[in-house]
Amino acid sequence: MSELEFFIESNRLFSQIGRAEVEALCARRHPFKHRKDEIIYMHGDPSDTMFFLGRGLVRLSKLSHDGRKFTLDVVEPGGFFGELCLAGETERRSIAEAMDDVSGFEIKKAVFEAYLVKRPAIAIKLLQIIGDKRIEMESMLEDMIFMDVESRIVSLLLKYSENGTVKLPMTHQEIADMTGATRVSASRTIVALRNKGLIETQGQRIVLTNEKQLREILGHSTNGKKIKFS
């Protein structure tokens, strides 16, 4: 399967749209490729392009005033990012960086807007997906406010797990960035979960060995009994 075919079949926005409709848009696409750790765009860069990811993982993050990084989202193959250019964003308000070698297609805002004007069904689908992203982000912020570090990390591991394994290779620093914790707190928590027999670590890969108990930890954190900050 070519990268274009994968893009059409796996992307939530186009998976239920006719192939001819998608190919009409893809005719105006431009490929992009970045190596691991390369910046795709920075905060303050012009926001005039939407990106569709075909391979690899992309981290979207923000920097605090004291230089700490906070991960907003991790985009997986078949996903898209940079869509706020369609909502009036003129300068990027986040950082997009490659977590490993990535590739995909980018489409200019003006091209995509003209496409959507003639295809309201896709515009509605896009609004639904952006709404889902907003709900996920609000849920993440609630976790930051009401959960302790252990619960935030457990929530992260469960969110990105598939068949008992966390899909994303994550260092302790990346886990800290994605949960608003310090690296020291994240490392201590990972070691504690491992010592309890709830997870196993294999390099940067994490296996959930007791998902039921991990979900119980998460359940306790949302009933008002475990609210503290780090």
Image (cartoon, rainbow, N blue to C red):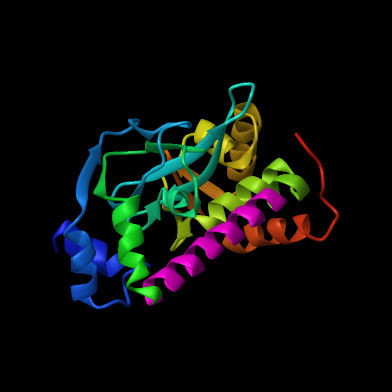
Q: Is residue 141 magenta?
A: yes
Instruction: Indicate left or right for 160 with 184 as reference.
Output: left
User: Which one is in front, 160 or 165?
Assistant: 160
32 to the left or right of 184? left
Residue under the image location 60 percent in, 37 percent down: 191
- As drawn, the residue found furthest toward the right would be 225
Q: Position of residue 2 (x, y in %)?
A: 14, 60
Q: Is residue 151 visible to the viewer in this orientation of the structure?
A: no
Residue 49 in view (yes/no): yes
The residue stretch that appears in magenta:
121-142
Place of residue 14 in the rendered image (x, y in percent of width and height, measured from the top left):
32, 70
> Which quadrant holds the C terminus?
top right
Q: Residue 193's x, y, as percent?
A: 62, 44
In the rendered image of this protein, does residue 212 appear above or below residue 187?
A: below
Residue occupying image coordinates x 38% and y 55%: 80
Count of picture labels: 0
Residue most toward the left? 2
Q: Residue at x 65, y 35 (%)?
A: 181
Which quadrant of the structure image shows residue 131?
bottom right
User: Residue 1: x, y in percent?
Assistant: 14, 64
| Pick the front one: 33 or 56 | 33
Whether 124 is drawn above or below 154: the answer is below
Residue found at x 47% / y 31%: 44
Question: Does 200 sit left or right of 215 as displayed?
Answer: left
Residue 22 drawn in magenta: no
Q: Foreground: 164 or 59?
A: 59
Residue at the extreme top: 66
Overall secondary structure of the magenta stretch?
Answer: helix
